[in-house]
Image (cartoon, helix red, strand yellow):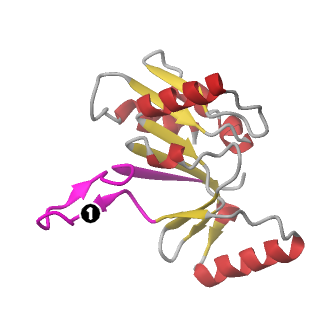
Amino acid sequence: AGETVREITANSEPEWDHQRSVMAWQVPLLQAVGVEAAVADGRMAFHWSPAPGAPITAACRDAFRRQLGEARIGITTADWCVADTGTLVLRNRPGEPVAVSLVPSVHVVIVEQSQLLYDFNDLYGRLREARRADPEALTARMTFISGPSKTGDIELVMVHGAHGPRALHLIVIRGA
């Protein structure tokens, strides 16, 4: 997974400016995969999003917003990936800002094979189980991502990246 992240970041050209930077969620899976080391080639700045539970000061929030605005690549995980439609499901929680999956022009998602679900019926079953086990387990909102952003709203001309990333890469870790 780390080698794939290195390849994606090395081959992703910025849309504007010549600087390339990466913003990643500070979660155990991404730390274990070594995403920071994978992009630490000296040509690209790397930033973690604020850690879950960390106190967020005004200076920290401002730095995060600036770094995210400069990031060309966002790296996150997902709670599940629905194979039938290729939909990624992200439960929005503290320390996992959804903006990391939406603002950069390239979104890289890393999941474990156990997070793959067959279809939405399987997803709804998992959500019911989670709610029964802990009513607080479900967040107030979830983000469903079914591919890179594109629209043909204006004169039927296809535009990529209008409402989110222009490119989406999914890395599935087998046997983690």
**Residue 8 makes an appearance in the image:** yes
- Towards the viewer: 10 or 71: 71
Residue lying furthest left in this view? 155
Number of numbered markers: 1
* 99 vs 124: above or below: above
For the record, the magenta segment spans 146-173
Question: Which quadrant of the figure has residue 31?
Answer: top right
Residue at (73, 75) in percent of width and height: 127
- Name which residue type carries label 1: Thr
Residue lying furthest top in this view? 42
Reply yes or no: does residue 170 show up in magenta: yes
Residue at (36, 22) in percent of width and height: 19
* 85 vs 93: above or below: below
Horizontally, is 149 left or right of 50 in the view? left
The residue pinned by badge 1 equals: 151
- Towards the viewer: 140 or 132: 140
Residue at (41, 61) in percent of width and height: 147
Horizontally, is 152 left or right of 167 in the view? left
